[in-house]
Image (cartoon, grey):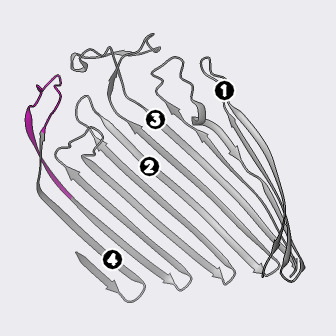
Amino acid sequence: MVKIDQRECVTIQGILYLTDVIRITVIRPLSTDALANGTSYTLDLHENGGLLGVALRPTPQWRVNGNIELSYADNTYTQISPKTLQHYVFRVSYKPKGWATISGAFNDLERRNNVALVNHMDHSRSLTLGASLAPSEHYGLDLSYGYMDIMSRTGLCYASTPAPIGAAAAPADCGTNLYLGDGYYDAPTQYGAIGITITPVKKFRSSLGYSMSAVNGATELLNPRQAPGSLQSQFQTPYAKLAWTLYPGWVWKADWNYYGYGEGTPIGPTSPRSFRGNVYTLAVRHEF
């Protein structure tokens, strides 16, 4: 491990890891196309990688830190285990005033296994931004936005009746399976929210807000009856809350929450699902 400190505003840390040999010995209880029942075999893995971390504080109000990790293996035990891995993480926060905070984060995990007839690839990426503003004890504002994309793709052999449109014929390595696919799955999702709190007097508190998430994804449809479902959907939840202190120890509360979910255009015989609901709550809280 290497650590470098330059004054108090910069910190750098690094780790290099080397794995000589990871040996896996397996005795298969069931026969496969390649191995008979009870056949034992060994698999040797060699993996190397490194991790670098940086923390910055340019000003007392501004903080930045990040990590980068890279690794490589010459072999894998399962198809979805990566031979190459890249992981990037960055975070930043800024406080221009005592009553204001702005923050953001980025996370990207990339994995690959490019072996023939596997060609596995996946990533998990996310970006978040947020702001919290409370210039007065009487009101405040919260804002947030997020983006996430989870994707995977792996070569797979399968059988289906009837065959999906455009299905590719399977090679001899697929055994009795008739078709070859890539198992593609991608679910990019966006999220946004806003919340406002208002307290005009000490005895009265209120808040209202709105949040929504939307998915615009896709996947390989191995069955003609399959529908994208929640991969093409939206979900929204506005709300409002009131609290009034009638007497010390007695608080009257009223809440409203709305839940709405809907899916995109149907594919196949399955119609799009949707629901909505309003929830009203009246309560009295006693503190003693």
The residue pinned by badge 4 equals 12
Identify which residue is drawn at 52% across, 40% down. Answer: 187
Give yes or no for residue 198 being in the magenta stretch.
no
User: Which residue of the protein is positioned furthest toward the front in this rendering?
Assistant: 288
Residue 77 % position (x, y): 20, 42
Extent of the magenta region: 27-48
The residue pinned by badge 1 equals 265
The residue pinned by badge 2 equals 124
Instruction: Report the amino acid beneath label 4.
Output: Ile
Q: Within 10 Å of the Cα at label 1, are there few (<14), some (14-19), or many (20+) other Cα atoms?
A: some
Instruction: Report the amino acid beneath label 1.
Output: Thr
**Mark in the foreground, 3 or 4:** 3
Instruction: Report the amino acid beneath label 2.
Output: Ser
The residue pinned by badge 3 equals 185
Q: Earlier in the sequence, mark 2 or mark 4?
A: 4
Looking at the image, residue 17 sits to the left or right of residue 253; the answer is left
SS category of the residue bearing label 1: loop
Q: Establish if 105 lies above or below 26.
A: below
Q: How much space separates mark 3 and mark 1, taking CA atoms?
A: 18 Å
Residue 123 % position (x, y): 41, 46
User: Which residue of the protein is positioned furthest toward the bottom in this rendering?
Assistant: 7
Q: Earlier in the sequence, mark 3 or mark 1?
A: 3
Q: How much space separates mark 3 and mark 4, taking CA atoms?
A: 37 Å
